[in-house]
Image: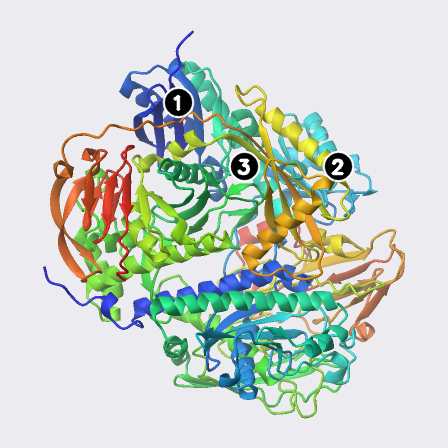
């Protein structure tokens, strides 16, 4: 018997594949690692990096106890449209559901705002004869002849995957299930996704969009995971591979292959978990994760280590991250907000001549002006360079030299000269504006969750996060920011901290007073069965804990509130408690409860969870010596307060800071992937886990 | 190191801080919008999203509105807020007051749109208004709006009144509303949703003002108006001076109606004149009030002109903006004309069919016009559900028409068939794109939609639908050599109904086998079809929406 002592986490992103190797015996991270993602064959980069990260500490593959994986492969396949040739079967009369959408002009001032094309073109969308009513009664039986004809024709056209979405199938799934049997009989190699299994909820557009996207990525994810598992076996790793779901739960590779759309936000969900972990580690219950990268910034409220989960998200927003411009996906997803604000966000003057930043981004190519790769438009990174926040010689740890003179001329030409400002003021304007955009989005996110920002601690990561975090925190009234050690691989850390968990949902619209409770019981039995199937064979997870939640509204409303019912399954006897919990939540969110309306339930959720957390950091001992040893040089850095202007500030090396060290602003702390900008009147402590804990002054200094 | 002047030390309205404050205000209106959406109970508001939210200063000038707001509502909100101020001077207002009205001449052109106006107090002073206008599920009156003879038949008219007086509900007003609408619980709950949103907006405005130490919204409003006006004047200046004329003929009710439009551009000013349009119609609510005509005249020009501004700057962006800066657009419509219904001799206005949005603007771009069929199901009791059905439209030289954002000028969405069926005893048999419905062209129009439905089997009572179709007589016109789209087609049990047979617009289905079908046209084509890219022709053929002929 080999002694296993390591846990490994791999996060495949668009550019980099990140690794964390955790030594469970020592309670410490053994190694961080990064390799370039292999777009052609992602498994190859995973294997290369896996081997390398083990080599750094001399570990063997069979010493790994637990391996977890988060990936953007599903999102990327949808955005780049590299999924399988997919067919869609709908009820007769509903072939164009995907194309009709919700017919909404999502921006009233942009008459030509685009929509993403459906993942299934019209010629591959086919109708079958059948009809079920709103109550689940069969009005017209499934005409199996029409099903066979359509499947035969789709397969003849080279379809590798078939999505099935019949009207009211969330109420009665039998016709969809029969179609799956016929596909298995006629074309066993073609994968099938059923709307009644992937997203059994009311609303034909959203449900069809979800099942079509699921079918579209299913063959690709299956091939990828089978390839990866095969390679890992060859390498000598025999234990299971677990995957991070968008909801923040961990699932088995087999379950992930069954519902690939549930992996859509796998990486960001893992990042939110990392923030929650570090917040909890520092003793805080309410944490706002703040992840700012090159193109977007994400924020997520995490309460007691758990992010809130939403039932709907949009994939492939084609128009500047605007809500409404993407494909709706009904899958439980960590409820984070994402806006077009990153290091690459372009600053410009809007039609009214006011400064505006983002959402369009210079991205990696051509990138910010200061990259010197042909980008001419000024970006947030250019502003940060001009203000001295970034060291042109230490960008990405010195792997890429920035050209500050290009940043200055871009800002001068496109912003400063038009506003009659100096370049420094224009650069400061860019920095302040993008911070305000992010603070506004985060504020709305917090207020919607009824959380006062002053009770919240921010955990900042992402390439641009630590340079903006403290000012964003100040705008929100947040008084403490944590910049974790290993922030450059936060998603990989986060996946190690997440529990085995599976959120499930069934639609059954009913008034609470008139509910058929035996039907509710069937729904919950069904979900429990699905959960135990997913958890079976997972060591330590055979007996998951169950919690439930209901999407409820006042009779007649069109929008629901999710009400958590921890440690209980809804039954007739609990109706009073359920109504009470709903009214309480409603009052928290909207301020007033309408009079004289009954309560309806739309969706019934079950959350199965089994804690088998392997990531337990131990404290690192304090070292002798003070922060002066970490001080590498000084440079001129601009701050807006207490007196606006450049001042000479110390620059510290993050890797030479150890527990017990304290610093005070103004200063910057550099690590390879990010720079922490600490304004005046803030103090920085290094905690027992080498995380930077920044305390903001009480003085307002706007 | 020298300390230099910075944005932080400038006045709060430099281009950086004004942008930030404005964007915060727009964020507040977005949150108001979400609150209405989530707390309303009618289909028209909660699902179809026919409402808007705005913040105004203490004088009733627009400051910010949600980007998802119904455009027309945004533009009439200053009018209705000033109407409140005229009747209830600002010094008489108290915290907890809420004013309501649905007067078509002060508000949004027909009785169905109810405005809720909430003054926002900083201390004991009114610093602004949070206003929401929403399309109510019922306002009483006739169900067949095509046959009404005056505005009194169209339903309850609510003058500018306090529904809440210092937080106390005015039971007389409340009772009048409840007793005069078909769905009293729904109507009252929806008004409460509007108030809830206004209250939230008010709280957030106050905390913003405190944070920036602003005494009121007035200075912000002035600045935004000035910036908007400058941008709009710049855009108008780029249009060559001259007089542009256009005329369209619309279906009307019993007979076609003619709309004339004359746009005169001189320097940075634009005058729009609907004089010469047909006179008011005495029957069927297709007349427009001036507030409504003005709103539909102003709105399409904002994105159209802003687009020019975008192209000029070479940056592909559009930002949220207030409704300010529209003053250069002066409109005249002869009193008593179809585009300016006379308040003294109140003509019916419910359908507002002669909306100015139909008139092609002088700038030469083909704008979408769209009047969808509105369907209302009615069983033994009033159900009043309303799935929008949209026309496809055209994008002119921008390229191929989209199938989706089709009801212009509107920000509403459709209602899912599954949701619709769950609320009314109807079975939808078909709801697809309509083959052959796009006008041919170098860039063809988008395809229109068709819907076919009947009573839910087992539902025994007669089921009535009320519809107000357009394009039965006149198809959408092609431009620059593009072909026209088809006409709207309405069938009852397979039988095509002509404009005369639509009559009052009430269609009653008596048995479960009855089928009712509405097929609306797509957009017209732009440019000669012979110049169409062969790859696009092939794609159309593959889609089975265009036949080879």
**Which mark is first along the chain, 1 or 3?**
1
Q: In this view, does B407 lie to the left or right of A619?
A: right
Residue B544 at x, y percent in the picture: 66, 50
Tell me the mark number nearer the camera, choosing from 2 and 1: 1
Residue with the mark numbered 1: A7
Residue nearer the viewer, B491 or B318: B318
Residue A404 at what x, y percent from top left? 18, 52
**Chain holding disc 3:** A
The chain under label 1 reads A
Label 2 element class:
helix
Mark-to-mark CA distance, 3 and 1 = 23 Å
The residue beneath circle 2 is A175
Disc 2 chain ID:
A
Residue for badge 3: A262
Quick one: SS at disc 3?
helix
Circle 2 packing at 10 Å, graded few (<14), some (14-19), many (20+), is: many
Q: In the displayed structure, does residue A345 sit left or right of residue A566?
A: left
First of labels 2, 3 by sequence position: 2
Residue A516 falls in which quadrant of the image?
top right
């Amino acid at each position: 018997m080999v002694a296993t002592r390591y846990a490994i986490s791999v996060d495949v992103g668009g550019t980099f594949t990140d690794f964390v190797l955790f030594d469970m015996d020592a309670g410490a991270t053994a190694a961080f690692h990064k390799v370039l993602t292999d777009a052609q064959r992602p498994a190859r980069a995973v294997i290369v990096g896996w081997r390398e990260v083990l080599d750094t500490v001399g570990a063997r593959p069979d010493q790994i106890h637990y391996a977890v994986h988060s990936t953007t492969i599903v999102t990327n396949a949808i955005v780049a449209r590299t999924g399988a040739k997919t067919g869609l079967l709908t009820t007769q009369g509903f072939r164009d559901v995907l194309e009709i959408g919700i017919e909404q002009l999502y921006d009233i001032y942009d008459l030509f705002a685009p929509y993403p094309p459906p993942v299934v073109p019209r010629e591959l969308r086919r109708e079958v004869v059948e009809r079920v009513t709103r109550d689940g009664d069969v009005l017209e039986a499934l005409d199996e002849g029409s099903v066979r004809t359509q499947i035969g024709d789709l397969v003849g056209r080279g379809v590798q995957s078939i999505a099935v979405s019949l009207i009211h199938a969330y109420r009665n799934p039998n016709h969809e299930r029969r179609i799956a049997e016929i596909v298995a009989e006629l074309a066993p190699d073609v994968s099938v996704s059923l709307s009644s299994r992937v997203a059994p909820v009311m609303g034909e557009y959203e449900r069809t969009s979800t099942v079509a996207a699921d079918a579209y990525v299913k063959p690709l994810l299956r091939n990828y995971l089978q390839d990866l598992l095969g390679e890992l076996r060859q390498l000598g790793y025999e234990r299971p591979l677990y995957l991070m779901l968008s909801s923040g739960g961990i699932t088995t590779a087999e379950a992930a292959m069954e519902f690939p759309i549930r992996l859509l936000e796998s990486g960001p969900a893992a990042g939110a978990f990392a923030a929650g972990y570090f917040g909890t580690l520092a003793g805080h219950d309410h944490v706002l994760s703040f992840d700012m990268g090159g193109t977007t910034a994400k924020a997520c409220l995490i309460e007691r280590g758990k992010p809130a989960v939403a039932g709907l998200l949009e994939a492939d927003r084609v128009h500047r991250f605007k809500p409404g411009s993407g494909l709706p996906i009904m899958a439980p997803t960590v409820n984070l907000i994402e806006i077009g604000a990153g290091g690459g966000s372009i600053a410009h003057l809007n039609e009214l001549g006011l400064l505006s930043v983002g959402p369009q981004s210079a991205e990696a190519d051509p990138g910010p002006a200061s990259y010197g790769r042909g980008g001419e438009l000024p970006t947030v990174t250019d502003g940060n360079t001009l203000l001295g926040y970034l060291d042109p010689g230490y960008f990405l740890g010195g792997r890429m030299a920035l050209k500050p003179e290009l940043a200055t001329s871009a800002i001068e030409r496109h912003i400063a000269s038009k506003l009659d400002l100096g370049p420094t003021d224009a650069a400061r304007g860019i920095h302040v504006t993008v911070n305000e955009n992010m603070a506004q989005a985060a504020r709305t996110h917090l207020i919607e969750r009824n959380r006062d920002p002053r009770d919240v601690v921010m955990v900042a990561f992402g390439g641009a996060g630590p340079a903006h975090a403290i000012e964003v925190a100040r705008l929100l009234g947040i008084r403490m920011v944590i910049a974790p050690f290993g922030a450059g691989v936060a998603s990989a850390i986060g996946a190690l901290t997440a529990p085995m968990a599976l959120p499930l949902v069934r639609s059954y619209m009913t008034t609470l007073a008139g509910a058929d409770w035996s039907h509710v019981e069937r729904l919950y039995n069904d979900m429990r069965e699905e959960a135990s199937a997913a958890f079976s064979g997972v060591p330590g997870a055979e007996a998951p804990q169950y919690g439930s939640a209901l999407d409820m509204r006042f009779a007649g409303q069109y929008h629901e509130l999710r009400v958590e019912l921890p440690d209980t399954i809804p039954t007739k006897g609990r109706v009073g408690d359920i109504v009470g919990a709903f009214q309480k939540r409603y009052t928290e969110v909207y301020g007033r409860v309408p009079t004289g309306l009954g309560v309806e339930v739309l969706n019934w959720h079950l959350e199965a969870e089994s804690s088998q957390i392997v990531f337990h950091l131990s404290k690192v001992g304090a070292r002798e010596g003070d922060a002066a040893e970490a001080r590498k040089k000084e440079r001129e850095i601009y701050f807006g307060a207490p007196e606006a202007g450049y001042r000479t500030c110390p620059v510290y090396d993050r890797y030479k800071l150890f527990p017990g060290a304290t610093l005070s602003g103004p200063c910057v702390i550099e690590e390879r992937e990010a720079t922490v900008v600490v304004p005046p009147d803030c103090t920085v402590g290094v905690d027992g886990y080498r995380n930077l804990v920044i305390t903001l002054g009480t003085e307002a200094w706007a | 190191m020298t300390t230099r002047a910075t944005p932080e030390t400038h006045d709060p309205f430099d281009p950086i801080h004004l942008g930030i404050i404005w964007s915060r205000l727009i964020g507040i209106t977005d949150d108001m919008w979400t609150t209405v959406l989530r707390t309303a109970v009618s289909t028209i508001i909660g699902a179809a999203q026919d409402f808007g939210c705005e913040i105004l200063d203490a004088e009733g000038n627009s400051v910010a509105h949600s980007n998802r707001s119904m455009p027309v509502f945004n533009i009439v909100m200053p009018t209705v807020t000033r109407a409140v101020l005229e009747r209830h001077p600002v010094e008489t207002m108290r915290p907890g007051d809420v004013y309501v009205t649905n007067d078509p001449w002060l508000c949004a052109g027909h009785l169905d749109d109810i405005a809720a106006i909430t003054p926002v107090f900083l201390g004991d002073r009114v610093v602004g208004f949070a206003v929401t206008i929403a399309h109510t599920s019922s306002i009483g009156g006739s169900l067949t709006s095509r046959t009404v003879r005056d505005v009194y038949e169209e339903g309850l008219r609510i003058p500018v009144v306090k529904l809440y007086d210092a937080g106390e509900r005015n039971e007389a007003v409340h009772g009048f509303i409840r007793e005069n609408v078909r769905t009293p619980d729904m109507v009252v709950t929806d008004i409460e949703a509007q108030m809830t949103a206004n209250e939230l907006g008010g709280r957030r405005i106050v905390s913003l003002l405190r944070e920036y130490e602003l005494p009121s919204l007035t200075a912000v409003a002035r600045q935004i108006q000035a910036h908007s006006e400058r941008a709009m004047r710049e855009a108008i200046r780029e249009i060559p001076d001259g007089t542009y004329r256009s005329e369209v003929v619309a279906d009307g009710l019993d007979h076609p109606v003619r709309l004339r439009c004359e746009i005169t551009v001189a320097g940075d000013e634009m005058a729009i004149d609907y004089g010469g349009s047909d006179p008011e119609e005495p029957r069927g609510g297709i007349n427009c009030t001036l507030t409504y005509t003005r709103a539909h005249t102003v709105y399409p020009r904002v994105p159209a002109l802003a687009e020019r501004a975008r192209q000029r700057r070479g940056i592909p962006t559009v930002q949220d903006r207030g409704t300010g800066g529209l003053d250069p657009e002066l409109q005249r419509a002869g009193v008593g004309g179809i585009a300016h219904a006379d308040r003294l001799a109140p003509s019916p206005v419910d359908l507002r069919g002669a909306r100015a949005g139909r008139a092609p603007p002088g700038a030469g771009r083909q704008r979408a016009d769209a009047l969808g069929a509105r369907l209302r199901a009615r069983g033994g009791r009033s159900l009043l559900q309303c799935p929008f059905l949209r026309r496809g439209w055209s994008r002119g030289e921008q390229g191929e028409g989209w199938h989706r954002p089709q009801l212009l000028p509107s920000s509403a969405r459709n209602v899912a068939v599954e949701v619709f069926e769950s609320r009314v005893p109807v079975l939808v048999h078909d709801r697809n794109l309509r083959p052959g419905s796009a006008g041919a062209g170098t860039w063809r129009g988008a395809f229109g939609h068709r819907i076919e439905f009947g009573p839910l089997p087992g539902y025994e009572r007669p089921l009535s639908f009320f519809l107000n179709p357009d394009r039965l007589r006149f198809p959408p016109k092609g431009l620059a050599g593009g072909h026209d789209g088809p006409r709207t087609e309405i069938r009852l049990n397979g039988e095509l109904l002509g404009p005369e047979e639509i009559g009052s617009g009430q269609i009653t289905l008596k048995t479960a086998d009855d089928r009712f079908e509405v097929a609306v046209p797509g957009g017209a084509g732009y440019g000669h079809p012979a110049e169409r890219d062969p790859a696009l022709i092939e794609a159309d053929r593959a889609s089975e929406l265009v036949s080879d002929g």
